[in-house]
Each structure stands twice: as structure tokens, then as C-alpha cells.
Amino acid sequence: MSGSLRVAIVGATGLVGEALLRVLDARRFPVASLAFFAGARSSGSKLQALGAHHDVLEVDERTPDFSAIDLAFFAAGAEVSRMLAPRAAAAGTLVIDKSSAFRLDDGVPLIVPEINANAIGDKRLIANPNCAVIPLSVMLGPIHRQFGLAWVSVSTYQSVSGAGKEALLEFESQLAGERMPERVLPRRIANNVFPENGPFDDSGYGEEERKIAAEFQKILDDETIRISATSVRVPVVVGHGEAVAFATRQPASIEDIERILRSAPGVRFLPGTAYATPIEVTGSDDVIVGRLRPDTAHPGAYLAWLVCDNLRKGAATNAVQIAEAAYAAQATRGLDVGAKA
């Protein structure tokens, strides 16, 4: 990466946008300038970064001016991404999109850098996967690479922050005892859990469950992996947990699986009966895997538990890592990946 970059965050006042600022600072990403954009309700506010306060500008079909932006992180939802991300990429801006708008498009790489950074190529529009798919891919990608995966069954226990800032405010109001109808989440979440995350299809699967299956296969570049998911919303502020069951195509001992997880990039493996919880992983970029054991109902299969901070590695950190990997990959291809003239 040559020189510092003019960076924009579209959706800067959301939970992921705020996390992006923290991650860019923590990773010492080479930022020359920052521009912040958000919806009408947040425009006119200010955010502090790079030792100064910056205006938050309203995003619409005319703004931002992407000719003045080298790198744009989109965290404002699918509608905004569909409207602006292709235009930004056409202007030569490197776009990292957190929404679901382009994840399954054939021409758009869906990237978890530890697993498939080589798929970036010279693309200017890159999709950041679902917050539950990223840690699952970080954990199982290296196992698939060595032994192949025959099938995966996962139950995700997803925090309220994964549904956005408005959902978190709704959760907090319920905890405070306010009696208000659910507006963002389909059921009351305080002191409750529910297995619903997005609309159901005719087969009974929810939108999040369909995303997990389709995105996981794309990241691992293998549509033959059989995968099913159950997505549960839990009354936790930050941090997703996942109960994972999987079987390999080639025989693998539990010692083989443990060896792979101990050396897998981005994974912190806890042996035996040890495990981590969402509150312990908050603020971390690790995918923490524990409770690895044989699946006694399915010989040759294994069970494990993982946790991940959904706002960091599940969203913002992965996006920044994508940008780092994209610039590194394009530099090795002899492309001009520095700041625009």
C-alpha cells in the first residue's frame, strides 16, 4: 500500500460504523482523511477521529463524491449499497460492503481473509460476509482445506447488536421496564430468546439461516458441503455464540482436528472442556473455539462451541482486514493500489 488513503464510512453512526473507527485506529491503518456519511436522522452530527471532530454528511443518490475517496466502507444497509456501491467501484474506489446486497453475486468476492483472500484479485467491490458466517468460516475453513467437510450443522446464538442500533435501544428499553410494542425485533428479547432472524421461507428456514448456508459454501468455494442452520436471538449486547457439528470427508481424528485449530489463523483454541462466552470475547478479534468432542450420534463427526465479537471480527475488523488484503494482493499483481491522483 503506497501512501495514506482518503477513507469514507457510509453508515458511520451505526454500531458497525463506530466499530470501524476503533479498528482503523487500533490497526494503525494508513488514513490520510476521513469522511463520514449517514442517513438524514444522523446528518449534521459530529464524530471524533484523527484528533478532530468531523461532520457527518447525509448520504443520498448524489453523495458522496467518490472521485475524492480511495476506500469506502459501506455499513448502511442493502438499499444504500445497491444505490451507491457500484458507482463508487466504477469511480476506482475500493469498496468493502457489509450489507447483504452483493454477497452472492458471482462477480463479487465474498471474503474472510484468513480463508480466501486469494479470491480478491483486482476487484473494486468486495462483500463482507454475515456476522455469523465469518467465525464459522475461520474455524472450519482450515479443516475443510485438509480433510474436506461433508456436512455442517450449526445453531447460532446471536446478540442483539447484530440486529443494529435500533434493536439495541429496544432491548435497553425493555430492560428498563418500559412497556412498548416490539418495533425492530419480532418478539420481546429482554429475558427471552427466539429462533427467528429474518422472514421465513416456505420450507421454514429464516433469512439468516439461508444466508449462513449460502455464504459459507461460497467462501469455501464448495457447493457440495451440506449445511443447515438454526439462528437464535439471545439477550446479549455483543458477542455471537455458535454450537457447531461437522463431519469430514476424509477420516480425521480428534487430535487432527485439534492440531488444525491450534494453528488456524484467527482462532484461539481452548482444549478439553474449556470454553469462552460472549462477555469474555467482547473487544477481541479472536474466534475462540472450545469444547471440541466427538459427536456420539454421528461417528466420525465432531461438536464444538465458538464465540466471536460480532461487531469486530464479525463485521468491522474483517472489513479492515479485507482492505489490507486487497491492497496487498493488488500490489503483488503490479497494480496501482495507492491513493488516487
Image (cartoon, rainbow, N blue to C red):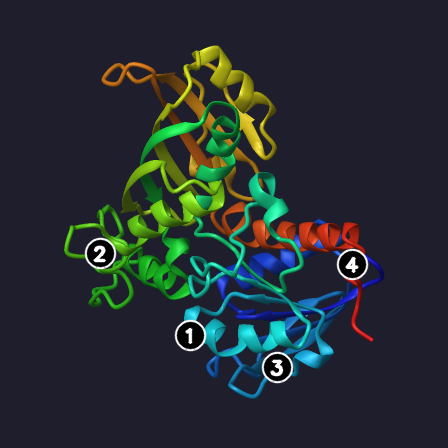
Q: Image check: 128 left or right of 297? A: right
Front label number (4 vs 1): 1
Q: Secondary structure at mark 2?
A: loop
Label 2 to label 1: alpha-carbon separation: 27 Å
Label 3 to label 1: alpha-carbon separation: 15 Å
**CB atoms at circles 3 and 1 under 8 Å apart?**
no
In the image, residue 16 above or below residue 270: below
Q: Kindly identify which numbered label has been placed on residue 79.
A: 1
Circle 2 residue: 188
Residue 308 visible, this orientation? no
**CB atoms at circles 2 and 3 under 8 Å apart?**
no
For marks 4 and 1 on the same chain, the one whose residue lies earlier in the sequence:
4
- Under mark 3, the amino acid is Pro
For marks 4 and 2 on the same chain, the one whose residue lies earlier in the sequence:
4
- Under mark 4, the amino acid is Pro
Circle 4 residue: 30
* Rendered location of residue 267, percent (x, y): 55, 31
